[in-house]
Amino acid sequence: MSRREALLQPVLTSTLLSTATTNTISPTVTLADQTIFPVCSFGLQIYNDQTAYQLTRTALKIGYRNFFASVLAGNQKGFAQAIRDSGIPRDELYICGSVVSNRVQGFDAAYQATSKGWQRNLAEFAYGNIDYLDQIMLDYPGPDVASIQGQWKAFEEMHQQQKVKSLSVSNFSTKQLDAVLAKAQVKPVVNQLPFSVAYHPNMEQVLADHRARDILVQAWAPLGKSLGGRFNAAIRRQCAVIGKQYNKTWAQVALRWILQKGVTFTTQSQNPEHFAQDLDLFDFVLSDSDMAVLDSLA
């Protein structure tokens, strides 16, 4: 399943948890570039602008301050207008946009496509008087090293122009990360990957590789379909059994497992109760034995 297909479907390690600072909204962590990143993100799915507007206002009211507004969702304008109308100061929000430029090949073509992509982000966000981003994400790598490095040059120019604070990627392998790092003056601080209780291939190696590069993993589709993984009835049932010990839902258990793996997440919902539950993860800790059971479910 592709990232776009997943969008269409309506953890922190003990050390990281202990160093996370807690505010009234969500714990935060400090990324490699020293920017502050809330660990819980609300990601807009493929809705129209009106629906995106309403969901963003709901998420803000419940307490979300970290938002992933993907270009793939096609509703950055509606999101931006909700931010504007909320009256919440811009410096209290963390806003991440994205660029898709993986269908062109070659350094120059990738550079040009990515430049147009980040400029389009700013044009859409301008509807909400948003004139800079906290993070911009390269959603999928180019087809070869030269293309990836062309993409990254465009991102670095956005950073140099002070239109964005942090640069990140999505769906990059270790080899593709190294293609960026080989030439990067500004390094990626986040890699957004499909990662969940239901899907975590080669988990320990993947997480170790990212720690070695000082790149935080953020899970997309943490409760839904992603690539080869899905939350079938058996997985949900096992999460629910564990959740009874902590008075938590199956979804809260699945999200807490992510956090305790040293991974953050971006989630979505159209249910206000689920909005709140997805933030209510910081008053319990899964035991080692429960973590081991959850590890084995994929």
Image (cartoon, helix red, strand yellow):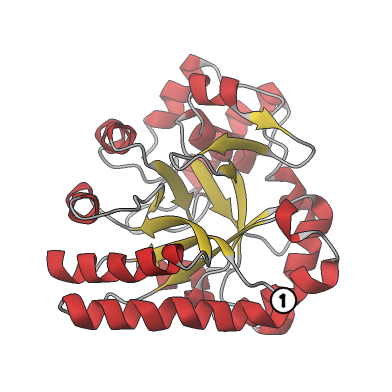
Residue at (37% x, 58% y) in the render: 170
Q: Nearer the viewer, residue 291 or 141?
A: 141
Q: Is residue 155 above or below residue 177?
A: below
Q: Is residue 144 visible?
A: no
Give 35 or 298, whichever is nearer the viewer.
35
| Residue at image coords 61%, 52% | 41
Task: Give whichever of 230, 138 is nearer the camera.
Answer: 138
Query: Closest to the observer: 30 or 22?
Result: 30
The residue beneath circle 1 is 129
Q: Position of residue 166 (x, y in %)?
A: 47, 54
Q: Residue at x 68, y 73 (%)?
A: 79
Picture coordinates of residue 241 (x, y %)? 60, 29
The correct choice, above or below, for 260 with respect to 123 in the image is above
Taking the spot 67% from the left edge, 34% from the top edge, the residue there is 281
Is the N terminus in the top left, top right, bottom left or bottom right quadrant?
bottom left
The furthest residue to the front? 161
The secondary element bearing badge 1 is classed as loop
User: Is 257 displayed left or right of 105 in the figure?
Assistant: right
Image quadrant assignment for residue 211? top left
Q: Position of residue 173 (x, y in %)?
A: 24, 52
